[in-house]
Image (tube, rainbow, N blue to C red):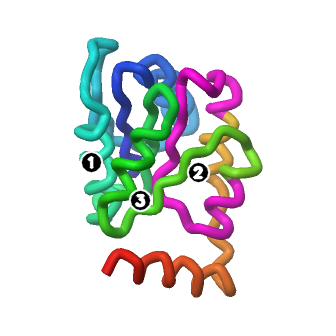
């Protein structure tokens, strides 16, 4: 299950991502927002991050205007490794090396076509473990 969330700036792009997930038969839970009316992104970042951190959802996708606010807010929740990605290489590597569990996208800085490619890479790239697992463990210890 994939947790989805956005603010008003990410509403349209998250709609495109939902279409992609539907086409791939991937299950998701949409935590909102549900319109382009101005709203507060930390509310949606928290909802998605808590769903991922609790294990209710295996990973998440958050979209706002730049992706920056969502990533900052989501990373405040223990157990979350949210990564802002604006290119395919970063999306692949954050999964392989950082075991990121939430993808953050900026709708005003990343076009829909690229954002969908980034989403596909994020969802289908596995964590390599090995020497990277030690580093992810060190990151987790910073939360204590």
Mark 2 vs mark 1: in front: 1
Q: Label 3's element?
A: loop
Any magenta on residue 112?
Answer: yes
Q: Which residue is mark 2?
A: 123
Label 1: how many Cα within 10 Å (few below 14, some 14–19, many 20+): some
Q: Is residue 122 left or right of residue 68?
A: right
* Closer-to-camera residue (116/133): 133
Label 3 vs 1, first from the N-terminus: 1
- Residue 109 location, quadrant: top right
Task: State the separation of the CA atoms marked 2 and 1.
Answer: 20 Å
Q: Which residue is mark 1?
A: 46
Q: Residue at x 62, y 44 (%)?
A: 85
Q: Quadrant of residue 112?
A: top right
- Few, some or many C-alpha atoms within 10 Å of disc 2 (few <14, some 14-19, many ≥20)? many
User: In the rendered structure, which disc, 2 or 3, sits on the residue that comes first in sequence?
Assistant: 3
**Callout 2 secondary element:** helix
Residue assigned mark 3? 58
* Quarter of image, res 54: bottom left
* Residue at figure coordinates x 51%, y 31% from the top left: 66
Q: Can you tell which of label 3 and label 1 is closer to the viewer?
A: 1
User: Residue 142 colored magenta?
Assistant: no
Numbered badge on residue 139: none
Q: Residue at x 46, y 17 (%)?
A: 12
Q: Identify whether 71 is placed above or below 15.
A: below
- Dot 2 or dot 1, earlier in sequence: 1
- Dot 3 alpha-carbon crowd within 10 angstroms: few under 14, some 14 to 19, many 20 or more: some
Q: Residue furthest right?
A: 89
Q: Which residues are magenta?
A: 92-116
In the rendered image of this protein, does residue 138 appear above or below residue 62?
A: below
């Amino acid at each position: 299950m994939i947790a989805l969330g956005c603010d008003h700036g990410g509403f349209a792009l998250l709609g495109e991502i939902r279409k992609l997930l539907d086409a791939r038969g991937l299950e998701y839970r949409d935590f909102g927002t549900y319109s382009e009316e101005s709203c507060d992104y930390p509310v949606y970042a928290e909802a998605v991050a808590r769903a991922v951190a609790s294990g209710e959802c295996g990973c998440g996708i958050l979209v706002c205007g730049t992706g920056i606010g969502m990533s900052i807010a989501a990373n405040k929740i223990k157990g979350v490794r949210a990564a802002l990605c604006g290119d395919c290489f970063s999306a692949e590597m954050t999964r392989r090396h950082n075991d990121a569990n939430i993808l953050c996208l900026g709708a005003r800085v990343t076009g829909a076509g690229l954002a969908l490619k980034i989403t596909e890479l994020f969802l289908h790239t596995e964590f390599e473990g090995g020497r990277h697992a030690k580093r992810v463990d060190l990151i987790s210890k910073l939360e204590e």
